[in-house]
Image (tube, grey):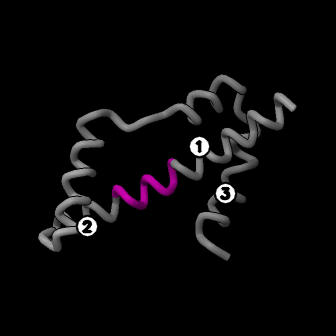
Amino acid sequence: MKSTTVLHRVLEPVLRSLPPEAARQIARAQADEELQQRVEELACKANEGTLTAEEQSEYEAYVDAGDIVATLQAVARKTLQAVAG
């Protein structure tokens, strides 16, 4: 089973217990401009093969966090659809 599937299954009951407005806020959440720029910078360096070991660790942490946020948002949207439907 993929880790995103496991995470989805773990998070779903938690998000179902949230009020709809909280689920909407999670579904709309975005990183701030500074963070987006840093991730883009690291992504470019990764594509060029010029990341330092420290930058590689930082980039991997951002990718992992992004996966978690994306999963949270997917579950929040599913929860909102269930409430609306």
For marks 1 and 2, the one nearer the N-term is: 2
Image location (x, y in percent) of residue 9: 72, 59
Residue farthest to the top? 21
Under tag 1, what secondary structure?
Answer: helix
Q: Is residue 14 above or below residue 29?
A: below
Image: magenta residue range: 62-69
Image location (x, y in percent) of residue 72: 59, 47
Please name the amino acid that badge 2 sits on: Ser
The residue wearing badge 2 is 57
Residue found at x 25% / y 51%: 40
Residue found at x 66% / y 66%: 6
The residue wearing badge 1 is 73
Disc 1 or disc 2, which is closer to the eye?
Answer: 1
Please tell me which residue lies in front, 28 or 16.
28
Q: How many tags in the picture?
A: 3
Q: What quarter of the picture does the N terminus occupy?
A: bottom right
Residue farthest to the bottom? 1
For marks 3 and 2, the one nearer the N-term is: 3
Does residue 32 appear to the left or right of 46 in the view shown? right
Please name the amino acid that badge 3 sits on: His
Does residue 52 appear to the left or right of 9 in the view shown? left
The residue wearing badge 3 is 8
Q: CA distance from mark 3 to mark 1?
A: 10 Å
Q: CA distance from mark 3 to mark 2?
A: 24 Å
Mark 3 neighbour density, 10 Å: few (under 14) some (14–19) many (20 or more)? some
Q: Is residue 41 above or below residue 48?
A: above
Residue found at x 42% / y 61%: 64
Q: CA distance from mark 1 to mark 2?
A: 24 Å
